[in-house]
Image (tube, rainbow, N blue to C red):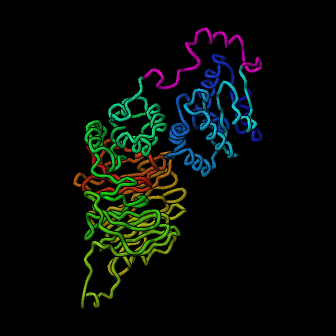
């Protein structure tokens, strides 16, 4: 068939437009193509990676759905274009019903932006080829032309089909009340998004929270899950009654919001983008270090998010932070180098005692033993773990007066997240996440588990572990915006949360709570 040859031809136009009148068979044709192109055994040249029926969608909501299918947490059309540009793998996208889109012109702009990349192919269905797409010189299959149709098969289908052009989503529903949390959580989220996009009213803070949470609300989920996401994204300038309403609606979602800080919050203040989190230990227990986009390290109370101050020295390009047992902070910069800072929450020696402190502190000695460029960092007890771009994890440990080093190749590609736990017998357990989408477990001095703890077709962006009263827990942040929480030693089902933005950082706390950091917010959740 011509469309399959077009997919295989490297010199063909990057856009194919399937056009024709209502009930000419466009939907049937694309349904057949999607079925053929998503089979497990389909060859790479014919595989489809994304399919979004555009009826009722704007460029924003179409971007959210495409991002989810492509393993990204893009929040805007621009974010989606950037994510597709960065991933050079072949990407084929089907976009039916352009003529039923909520804002066809903005969707056409998105299509044109995606069509710039050589590794992208787009199949767009519309009744007539719009001017914006004509400028791309696309391949066109006008199903009104006899050359594209088998008249006998088409007649059989047309006689049995109820409708080949489905009504846009939400067209049969009454308009939601955009000021009412129960209404917006319980109806078609695409319709809600389109109405919030067009509205200039803040709707008590619901509009900002909805657009901040993005694709976490338009993906398939329950009203309770939508309420939880909205609750987490709600700013401090919102109608205070919304918190109680959303808390009630979120019952059954698996989580409760302990506290949150979102962009623009003043009291208490938002600490900035949470690109990395480090949980205090020993003398700094109860503190969490938050690293922003400028490399500034701020300290907050784990219990309620109250500010504890900031460290005086920024680390430009900082990508990870970890507390040592002695209260020091190891910070990893964008060049893979470690630097040391001292937490403001640890009492400092004064007078004669400060003059007599000549020996290097444990964390200082451990960091001095790091000899490789690092891509990830964790501290546990008397050990510092770091990963590199080749997938190897190294652990530097204090062994009396000497430094011991262990290393293990655990991933294909870069190590992107590390977490450590000090076990009762004094040994250390290391969890690692990688660009290869695997989470591994390893104890230095022993062979790692042969199989991954978790594996997805998606990179790990953040990792954290904690010893809680109910046993060890592990929190994983994934590139597609999913946060996964699980008890390591039990077979209990994991819990999940999607903030709607790319997950930059996670933190597991000893009381069982977790913290999730994005560019827009920092939220603390407790399992419910």
Magenta span? 144-173
Please give the name of the residue rendered at 63% of the width and 16% of the height, measured from the top-left corner.
23
Please give the name of the residue rendered at 39% of the width and 65% of the height, measured from the top-left corner.
378
Residue sticking out furthest to the left: 469
Occupied quadrant, residue 382: bottom left
Where does the C terminus fall, quadrant-wise? top left
The percent position of residue 254, horizontal first and vertical second, equals 30, 41
Toward the viewer: 79 or 108?
A: 108
Q: Is residue 105 above or below residue 311?
A: above
Occupied quadrant, residue 52: top right
The percent position of residue 455, horizontal first and vertical second, equals 46, 47
The percent position of residue 152, horizontal first and vertical second, equals 70, 10
The percent position of residue 485, horizontal first and vertical second, equals 35, 48
Where does the N terminus fall, quadrant-wise? top right
- Residue 167 lies within the magenta run: yes
Toward the viewer: 143 or 396?
A: 143
Residue sticking out furthest to the front: 200
Toward the viewer: 313 or 509?
A: 313
Q: Is residue 388 visible?
A: yes
């Amino acid at each position: 068939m011509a469309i399959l040859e077009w997919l295989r031809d490297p010199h063909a136009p990057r856009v194919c437009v399937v056009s024709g009148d209502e009930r000419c068979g466009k939907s049937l044709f694309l349904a057949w193509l999607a079925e053929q192109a998503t089979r497990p055994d389909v060859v790479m040249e014919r595989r489809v990676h994304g399919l979004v029926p555009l009826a009722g969608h704007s460029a924003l909501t179409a971007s959210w759905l495409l991002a989810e299918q492509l393993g990204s947490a893009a929040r805007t059309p621009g974010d989606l274009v950037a994510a597709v540009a960065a991933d050079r793998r072949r990407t084929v996208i089907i976009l039916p019903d352009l003529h039923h889109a909520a804002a066809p012109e903005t969707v056409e702009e998105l299509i044109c932006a995606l069509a710039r990349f050589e590794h992208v192919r787009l199949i767009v269905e519309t009744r007539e080829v719009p001017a914006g797409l004509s400028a791309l010189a696309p391949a066109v299959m006008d199903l009104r032309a006899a050359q594209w149709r088998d008249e006998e098969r088409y007649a059989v289908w047309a006689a049995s089909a109820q409708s080949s052009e489905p009504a846009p989503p939400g067209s049969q529903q009454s308009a939601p009340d955009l000021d009412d949390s129960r209404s917006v959580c319980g109806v078609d989220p695409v319709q809600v998004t389109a109405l919030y996009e067009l509205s200039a009213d803040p709707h008590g803070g619901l509009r900002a929270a909805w657009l901040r949470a993005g694709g976490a609300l338009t993906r398939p989920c329950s009203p309770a899950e939508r309420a939880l996401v909205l609750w987490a994204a709600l700013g401090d300038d919102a109608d205070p009654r919304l918190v109680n309403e959303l808390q009630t609606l979120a019952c059954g979602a698996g989580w409760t919001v302990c506290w949150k800080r979102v962009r623009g919050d003043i009291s208490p203040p938002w600490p900035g983008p949470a690109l990395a989190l480090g949980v205090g230990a020993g003398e700094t227990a109860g503190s969490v270090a938050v690293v922003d986009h400028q490399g500034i390290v701020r300290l907050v109370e784990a219990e309620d998010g109250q500010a504890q101050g900031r460290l005086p020295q920024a680390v430009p390009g900082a990508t990870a932070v970890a507390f040592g047992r002695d209260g020091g902070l190891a910070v990893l910069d964008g060049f893979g180098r470690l630097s040391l800072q001292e937490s403001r929450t640890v009492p400092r020696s004064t007078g004669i005692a400060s003059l007599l402190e000549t020996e290097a502190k444990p964390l200082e000695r451990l960091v001095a033993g790091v000899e490789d460029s690092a891509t990830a960092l964790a501290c546990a007890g008397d050990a510092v773990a770091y990963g590199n771009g080749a997938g190897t994890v190294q652990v530097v440990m204090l062994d009396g007066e000497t430094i011991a080093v262990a290393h293990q190749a655990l991933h294909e590609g870069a190590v992107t997240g590390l977490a450590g736990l000090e076990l009762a017998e004094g040994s250390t357990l290391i969890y690692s996440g990688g660009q290869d989408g695997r989470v591994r477990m390893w104890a230095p001095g022993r062979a790692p588990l042969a199989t991954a703890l978790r594996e997805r077709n998606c990179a790990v962006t953040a990792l954290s572990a904690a010893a809680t009263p109910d046993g060890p827990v592990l929190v994983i942040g994934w590139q597609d915006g999913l946060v996964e929480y699980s008890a390591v030693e039990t077979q209990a089902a994991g819990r999940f949360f999607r903030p709607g933005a790319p997950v930059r950082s996670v933190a597991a706390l000893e009381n069982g709570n977790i913290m999730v950091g994005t560019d827009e917010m920092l939220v603390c959740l407790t399992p419910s």
